[in-house]
Amino acid sequence: MTAAYTPLFAADTAPVEQIQYTEPDGTLVTFMGARPTERHARERGEAWDAPDQGPGRYFTFPTFYFQNRTFGLEIRDEVPAGRQRISVYLHVNDGTFRGTTFSLFRNINNPNVRDFGWSLNYGFNNPLEGNQPICHAGERNCMMSFTSNWRTSPHSPLKIGDKIELAPAPRLLSPVIDGGGERYYSFEQLYVVGKGMRPWYGIVPNLDSEPLPDSTLLGGQASVSYNYSEEPHRVFQQMANNIGIGNTKRFVQGRRLFHTSFADGKHSEHPTTNPVFTAHMGQLGPRYNQARCIECHVSNGRSTVPALGARLETLSVLTGAAGASGKVLPDPTYGLNVQQQAASTTAANYTVSVASYVKTVRTLAGGEQVELVKPVYSFKGPVPSLYSVRQAPQVIGMGLLEAVAEPTILALADPNDANGDGVRGVPHWVNNPETGEVHLGRFGWKATKASLRHQIGDALVKDMGVTSPVFPSYSCQRGAPDCHGATGATALSEDELQRMSDYLSLIGVPAQRSLRSGYPEGIRVSPEHDVNPQLIARGGAVFAEARCTSCHTPEMTTGNTHPFAELRDQTIRPYTNMLLHDMGPELADTLTEGQAGPSLWRTAPLWGLGSLKYVQGGAQNVRYLHDGRARTLTEAIVWHGGEASASRARFEALPKADRDALIAFLESL
């Protein structure tokens, strides 16, 4: 049943900034955001023909990345207007750049060009600075242009569809205003004449840039390109490919907060070099689980795998107590969740750990046996009457899910099982904690959060005891009914809360790794790219034949009202419907949240599954399902019950070759 609800974004929401438009004469104008990085896109941690010695440094975030170092390009493409000219303007977000270089057109005609090498190397000269390469924030004076395609020899006329690789390398004015580094590289992006920025992958020869097919773009044009610097462990931390210039600054500022300790203000990366965020020192609550967001969402992935008997300090243990008429009340000891660490050394020990596992074995077609383990928990404090253990999920693509219009999600619901397939799917209607308005739930294991703002505020107060405009008092974590009436400054200001929401909104989704890349003959293929396209295609077909797509919806299109233009009108492939489904008694816990009873769970997005083993530091460090009980994807599928029972049974009855193909497909996402 559809409730009377308020859409998350009003129909007349204006975009924060433009990322592309066409002028009346046909000129296409595209804005490309850029951030600093340390090396080139195709540089591994060693020479191309050398044994593996470690990752490259293309996906890294150098020290001081969050201030004075973001910029962008305004690309004025006159080819669609019938002219042979493309002009590129440099826009600096803060301060002054001096000596920024700009390389274009990958030099594929030179067989010696591998890691990097371009046909056109130029800079941005400012006529108001004596044609010196000095470019100031807020000005639009630094520019260069070209009138032919430098990929060919001799040059050919520019035409729609031509590929242009863009590789800017910023240099800050010396002496650097903040004492940080001066010279950086940036992302190497692919611009397609007459179309705009496109996520790319490497083809013959020498990993030449080629637009990824639409079918691989799990996050639409916000998808992250294939990575050839052997940094798959950093793939969840990258900006949307189509990010705008100003939004790049918003991204890095929000990322800084996500990595900041609310105990000592230090950044998780380069803590002795990056400036201390002194405004956030000493802001942890009296009890908490971790001091930084990134400590639960490891490398923007999931919780760490708990050792037997070790404190579950990167997972959440939500708690409650039964009240009258079935109402769930806060637990009298813990409030809404167990905060396992404390500022005081004399505070009560609230450690929760896995004491043991209950093991069962399931036999699949052909005799393959799957051992399932269900954790048994131990509480140092009082055992709550109602509780639910939750692992932190990865945080990619959340802005895209937020951008899906409510009618798109509601059209997937089938609360009365009208089609008779045994799969229902119901929306979870939740109240905005600030306004009381009814919204469609989208985030959290039970879709209890309507927006990223709501999700962030909830996690801050429950997991860190950190206040924000969403939950302005620590008492909110204890379920105090008047906690929203708190006055005074909160740990995170309104601007900072928005920055963190902006950051999570603009994290891109890795493109599906279902294509072979054009590595040079005799060169070692990076493990993440050693894929079998035929096996993956077969697995995708089996996934659909098993009707897994009844809940894990393969494709949807975002709406046109999200504040970020990057997320609007994108065809995405998240493999979720964001609805609640009854998963049966084996996956049920004891806690009801809102309208979601113990066995009701939101369909989890599947994008990024194949990258988890890299992000988490190895397959042995990856766990699946809400409480992390499943050690493999096969275990996760076999745990499915309730509305998913029929699909699980189909999977179990498949020949092993088809089961392996289905897993290969999931590993490509």
Image (cartoon, rainbow, N blue to C red):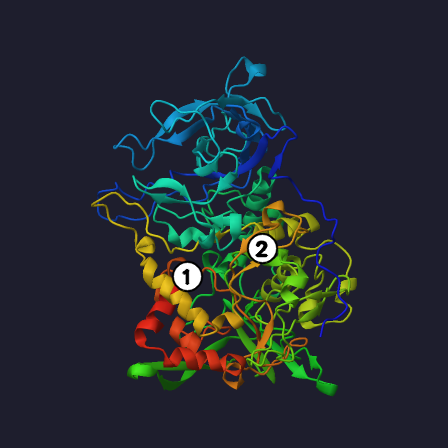
Find the distance from the CA under tag 2 to the CA under tag 1. 20 Å
In the rendered image, the vertical position of residue 660 relative to residue 591, given as above or below: above
Q: Which element carries disc 2, helix, strand or loop?
A: helix
In the rendered image, the vertical position of residue 343 relative to residue 351, given as above or below: above
Q: Residue at x 60, y 25 (%)?
A: 140
Nearest the eye: 457 or 30: 30
Q: Residue at x 29, y 33 (%)?
A: 113
Q: Name the residue tied to disc 1.
A: 612
Q: Name the residue tied to disc 2.
A: 400
Q: Residues within 10 Å of mark 2 (few under 14, many from 20)?
A: many
Q: Residue at x 38, y 74 (%)?
A: 634
**Which three-letter amino acid code belongs to the residue tagged 2?**
Leu
Q: Is residue 102 visible?
A: yes
Q: Residues within 10 Å of mark 1 (few under 14, many from 20)?
A: many
Q: Which mark is residue 498?
A: none
Name the spot of residue 229 as percent of width and height, x first.
35, 45
Q: Is residue 288 left or right of residue 610?
A: right
Name the spot of residue 223 as percent of width and height, x first.
49, 50
